[in-house]
Image: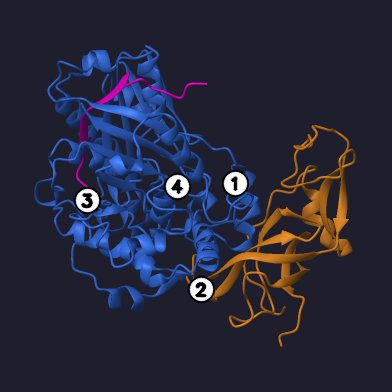
């Protein structure tokens, strides 16, 4: 990725840094309930499934499925290159954990709902944005 | 648990300010214009108003999103309030009106002044529709950081609700074979109705070719799938029904409301990526009444983006889930003389983004027979008004007495 676009940075805190800095180790991490094994996103102090409090960040495989996407054509920030894709992906380990993200290294003919993708990280100021690229070759 | 309002809440008056693009008037003055018009329309005086409800309350950003909060209106009119409520955490923009219904139904207030003011057209200036950005997107210095829940979409360049809603629309297209030609009918119908509304912003005829050749904003949305930022204020008076009987106009009973959000309150974690939260609000509306979708004579359904009106058609049971595309195909069914006249003032797509309140204002206008050239035939008795998309959704079913 040579042409890195402007990205708003999140406010990194103790509660979310496992997510925003996991890419430093090449890992996509989510909080996981140690009692019932539910992945939790966005992070919160109590497991929404079993109300357990023993939560710890764990890496997932980084594999995901495109649940939906859009090609954005509007330059919301003056001078931005368009179009670019925005997608919601479902994490392979637990599909109800979703991320809004960008699909990179992917043209309009390739991007579709159901496309298998894998995480790649784009770093800015110590924040690692989890983006996704196609994990399959086109037939 | 009973979800019934038992007709204890009524709408007794409506008012609107000047509406337009970049009219550069003090948004509080627009608000007061609308509020005073609504109070007069009800045959009340400001001494009678003992409640205020508004959405989203006082907010500095995004620019122009909120024209006035509770406090300014309270003080400007020197009201003596028993109950008031304003804020963004509500079942959509009309959640504020639903709050008012609950307040009068429980006796906490008698006549509640509800309002919504936008001045996005002036505030956004020449730049066109602005993204959802903390700090309004402009100014110098370091860019702000994406706050709270916004950290999960803004860093991925999903700056606008156009992007967030487009994601739902695309999934709907994928699952149900919905097409842009079908979705176009929401925009074309709105434009046709706007031609009959002297206060609408865009009134020139629009063809399917115009629609299909418009520039894309965020697939599958083109420019004409996105509502037009406006300046303007709308006010609605919600009265306790037992205090509504001897006023200037026949009260419109609030037969039922939909305020439910049973899935996750999130743009991307909601369980169903085709329905959005409006699914739950629509379902609840019919849990509170014996009336059925067939009884509705006119529907004013939020069209901040065209797809949202389709989602509301499904949520409210006017067609099955997934079938809003075929339902609106050709446009006859939703035309002013069709079986379900839709967005008769021109919707937000053509009449202007009055952010939900315009839909309720129009529902009342139609029930009172005040639609002039755009009045639907047959003296409508039952109307539904709905607002919100994504994790926001609230709706009201209104009946003439």
Taking depth in this image into account, of B220 and B113 the one nearest to the observer is B220
Residue at position x 9%, y 51% from top?
Answer: B373
Q: Secondary structure at mark 4?
A: helix
Q: Residues within 10 Å of mark 1 (few under 14, many from 20)?
A: some
Q: Which mark is on residue B315?
A: 4
Q: Which residue is mark 1?
A: B266
Chain letter tied to orange: A
Q: Are marks 2 and 4 on the same chain?
A: no
In this rendering, the label closer to the viewer, 2 or 4: 4
Q: Are marks 2 and 1 in contact (CB under 8 Å)?
A: no
Above or below, B286 against A125 in this view is above
Q: Is residue B12 magenta?
A: yes
Q: Is residue B74 magenta?
A: no
Q: Are marks 1 and 4 in contact (CB under 8 Å)?
A: no
Quadrant position of residue B11: top left
Find the residue positioned furthest to the left. Answer: B372
Q: Secondary structure at mark 2?
A: loop
- In 3D space, how far apart are the residues under numbered discs 1 and 3 (Cα atoms)? 30 Å
Q: Which residue is mark 3?
A: B345
């Amino acid at each position: 990725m040579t042409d890195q676009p402007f990205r708003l940075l999140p406010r990194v805190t103790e509660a979310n840094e496992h997510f925003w800095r996991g890419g430093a180790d090449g890992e996509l991490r989510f909080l996981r309930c140690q009692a019932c094994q539910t992945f939790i996103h966005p992070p919160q102090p109590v497991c929404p499934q079993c109300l357990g409090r023993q939560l710890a960040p764990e890496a997932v495989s980084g594999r995901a499925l495109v649940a939906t996407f859009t090609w954005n054509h509007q330059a919301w920030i003056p001078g931005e290159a368009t179009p670019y894709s925005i997608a919601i992906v479902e994490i392979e380990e637990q599909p109800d954990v979703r991320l809004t993200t960008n699909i990179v290294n992917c043209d309009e003919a390739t991007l579709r709902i159901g496309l298998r993708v894998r995480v790649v990280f784009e770093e800015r100021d110590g924040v690692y944005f989890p983006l996704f690229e196609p994990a399959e070759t086109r037939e | 648990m009973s979800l019934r309002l038992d007709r204890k809440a009524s709408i007794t008056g409506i008012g609107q300010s000047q509406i337009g693009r970049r009219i550069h008037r003090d948004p509080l003055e627009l608000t007061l214009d609308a509020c005073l018009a609504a109070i007069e329309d009800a045959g009340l005086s400001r001494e009678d108003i003992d409640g205020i409800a508004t959405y989203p309350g006082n907010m500095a950003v995004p620019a122009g999103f909120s024209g006035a909060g509770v406090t300014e209106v309270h003080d400007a009119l020197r009201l003596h309030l028993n109950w008031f409520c304003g804020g963004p955490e509500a079942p959509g923009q009309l959640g504020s009106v639903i709050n008012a219904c609950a307040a009068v139904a429980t006796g906490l207030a008698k006549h509640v002044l509800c309002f919504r003011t936008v001045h996005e057209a002036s505030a956004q200036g020449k730049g066109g529709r602005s993204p959802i950005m903390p700090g309004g997107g402009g100014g110098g210095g370091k860019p702000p950081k994406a706050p709270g829940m916004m950290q999960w979409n803004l860093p991925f360049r999903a700056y606008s609700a156009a992007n967030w809603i487009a994601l739902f629309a695309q999934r709907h297209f994928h699952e149900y074979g919905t097409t842009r030609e079908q979705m176009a009918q929401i925009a074309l119908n709105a434009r046709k109705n706007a031609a009959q509304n002297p206060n609408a912003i865009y009134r020139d005829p629009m063809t399917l070719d115009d629609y299909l050749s418009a520039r894309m904003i965020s697939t599958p949305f083109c420019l004409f799938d996105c509502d037009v930022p406006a300046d303007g204020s709308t006010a609605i008076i919600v009265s306790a029904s037992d205090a509504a009987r001897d006023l200037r106009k026949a009260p419109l009973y609030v037969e039922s409301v939909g305020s439910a959000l049973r899935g996750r309150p999130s743009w991307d974690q909601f369980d169903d990526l085709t329905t959005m939260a409006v699914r739950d609000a629509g379902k609840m509306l019919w849990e509170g009444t014996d009336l059925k979708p067939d009884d509705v004579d006119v529907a004013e359904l939020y069209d901040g983006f065209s797809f949202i009106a389709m989602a509301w058609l499904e949520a409210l049971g006017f067609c099955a889930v997934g079938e809003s595309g075929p339902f609106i195909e050709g446009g006859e069914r939703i035309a002013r003389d069709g079986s379900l006249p839709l967005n008769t003032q021109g919707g937000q797509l053509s009449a202007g983004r009055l952010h939900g309140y315009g839909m309720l204002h129009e529902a009342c206008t139609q029930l009172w027979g005040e639609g002039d050239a755009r009045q639907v035939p047959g003296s409508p008795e039952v109307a539904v008004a709905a607002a919100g998309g994504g994790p926001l959704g609230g709706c009201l079913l209104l009946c003439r007495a």
